[in-house]
Amino acid sequence: MKARIDHIAIPVDEPKVAVGWYIENFGATCLYVDETWGLVEFENVKLAFVVKSQHPPHFAFEVEHLEGGTLHRDGSRSVYKRDPWGNLYELVKYE
Amino acid sequence: MKARIDHIAIPVDEPKVAVGWYIENFGATCLYVDETWGLVEFENVKLAFVVKSQHPPHFAFEVEHLEGGTLHRDGSRSVYKRDPWGNLYELVKYE
């Protein structure tokens, strides 16, 4: 079964400004934003805009089963892993 | 209107091996692969695995209207631009 990609995190210096820019230019909807990261929704996938020093660039797969992981404030749990080429990816499960 | 993200290009050293790895681990379907890049489809979006020296990492929005741009072999046309934070993005129109 094909996995679903939940979001991709892109590095920016100013998440709040970036969120505004992507809303204005690509009709994104803001789901969350603070000084260190923002999350916007496009038609088929979300992009996160992250301050690189605090949130590393990555992409995230939504999974149905996840052992352990870190519990986030929104009720999701996730783990970070690296593919064989060093790219960071996240597995996220929404409760 | 929310834009649709067509694909995100992720740097890897070995596109053919990467395509195989993402098929095996995440059920992706291969749409194209050669020595310099590969394209796989997930449930909601595509990922491209690119040799960094030949294809820069980027993300692509599908658009309905595009002036000019480069015509590709699959009939699509596209232009590359940078957001204010230096991230490379592509606008792609399928004929």
Image (tube, coloured by chain):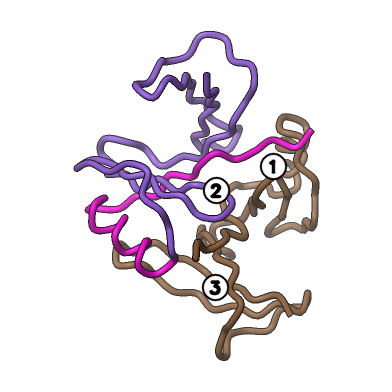
Chain colours: A brown, B purple
Residue sitting at the far bottom: A68
Which chain is mark 2 on? Answer: B
Residue sitting at the far front: A1
Do tag 3 and tag 2 residues touch (Cβ < 8 Å)? no
Q: Horizontally, is B16 left or right of B48 in the view?
A: left
Residue located at (58% from left, 73% from top): A63
Image quadrant assignment for residue B50: top left
Return the mark for residue A18.
1
Return the mark for residue A91.
3
As measured in the structure, the alpha-carbon distance from the residue carrying label 3 to the one carrying label 1 is 25 Å
Q: Residues within 10 Å of mark 1 (few under 14, many from 20)?
A: many
Per the rendered image, the range of residues in magenta is B1-26
As measured in the structure, the alpha-carbon distance from the residue carrying label 2 to the one carrying label 1 is 22 Å
Residue located at (72% from left, 55% from top): A38
* Residue mark closest to the camera, 2 vs 1: 2
- Was residue B12 drawn as part of the magenta stretch in this picture? yes
- Of the residues shown, which amino acid type is indicated by label 3? Leu
Do the dots labelled 3 and 1 sit on one chain? yes
Return the mark for residue A66.
none
- Of the residues shown, which amino acid type is indicated by label 1? Ala
Image quadrant assignment for residue A53: bottom right
Do tag 2 and tag 1 residues touch (Cβ < 8 Å)? no
> As displayed, is residue B62 above or below residue A45?
above
Q: Residues within 10 Å of mark 3 (few under 14, many from 20)?
A: many
Which chain is mark 3 on? Answer: A
Q: Return the x and y of residue B4 as percentages of the image width and height.
A: 65, 38
Q: Return the x and y of residue A40 as percentages of the image width and height.
A: 73, 50
Which chain is mark 1 on? Answer: A
Q: Return the x and y of residue A9 as percentages of the image width and height.
A: 57, 55
Q: Residues within 10 Å of mark 2 (few under 14, many from 20)?
A: some
